[in-house]
Image (cartoon, rainbow, N blue to C red):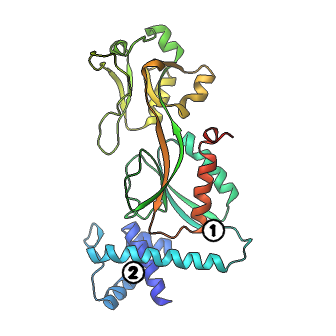
Amino acid sequence: MDSLGSISVFVQVAETRSFTEAGRLQGVSSSAVGKSIARLEARLGVRLFHRTTRSITLTSEGALFLARCRKILAEVEAAEFELCDSASQPHGKLRISLPQVHGLVMPVMNEFMALYPQIELDLDLTDRMVDVVEEGFDAVIRTGQPRDSRLMARPLGEFHMVLVASPLYLQQHGVPQIPADLAEHACLRHTFHATGKLEPWPLIGEEGAPEPSLPARLVTTSIEAVHHAALAGMGIACLPDFMTHEDVAQGRLQRVLDAHMKHTGQFWVLWPSSRHATAKLRVFIDHLSLRLFPANKGQ
């Protein structure tokens, strides 16, 4: 059991890259964490971390050990759950990475918390491409076709990108009829956090016509900021339909150039294939599949 405790401490340090934070999560001092890691390294005869005054990083041996330790802890949790009363609720902590589309994901997270009060959610709302395995996430929600062979995946639902603007903006500046008309409009652009590149607008250009110019009035890494600017009448934005559906229905936004747009995206939930699908993770994935895009499922 002492070895199991050391393994738990090691995983916390590896995931937080901090003795202090690992100690806080374990309910012990940072010096106790340091001593536990030192004892573990002495017992194994290898160095698990490179330590400097500014950072803590895994050695190659530490990275290999981390993958095995996560499996061990997942198996222990699964064994504990199987021994519990079958009527008991799934419990424990889930570390989840989500895209910054709060209006889509947070109602579903709130429903989940109400249904499973014994599960603690640690949510990382970011558009950066996290490393699910190395950063210790239980699951992530992302768009695009999964390409990481280390991950299991389940599709959650489809969406489309649409061009929208406020009725007031369109009254003042006119409604574009073809993509080339966008050169005369203020465009509200979203950039990818990791690369700084502008997200392309999926326009169907006329054959032989050059790509339309998109003069940017706003450039931001937050798609929700683009949404707010569009509602405020600042220009034309390219946004996912789940973000604009209610605004269009209520007349706050108006779709334009629908016939010149072609896009279908998909949300996925991804989780490490090496990790035992614990009860808390299973109910989380099932809840997402049921509730994130209910309209796609005929509900």
Q: Position of residue 191 (x, y in %)?
A: 35, 36
Query: Badge 1 is on which residue?
Result: 91
Q: In the displayed structure, does residue 152 sit left or right of residue 183?
A: right
Disc 2, SS: helix
Q: CA distance from mark 2 to mark 1?
A: 29 Å
Res 78 → quadrant: bottom right
Q: Foreground mark, 2 or 1?
A: 1
Locate the C terminus by quadrant: top right
Q: Does residue 196 appear in this view?
A: yes
Q: Residue at x 49, y 32 (%)?
A: 160
Give above or below for 85 relative to 55. below
Judge by depth and name the residue closer to the eye, 220 or 294.
Answer: 294
Disc 1, SS: loop
Give above or below for 192 relative to 130. above
Q: Residue at x 35, y 34 (%)?
A: 199
Q: In the displayed structure, does residue 270 sit left or right of residue 184?
A: right
Query: Badge 2 is on which residue?
Result: 31
| Residue 223 circle label | none
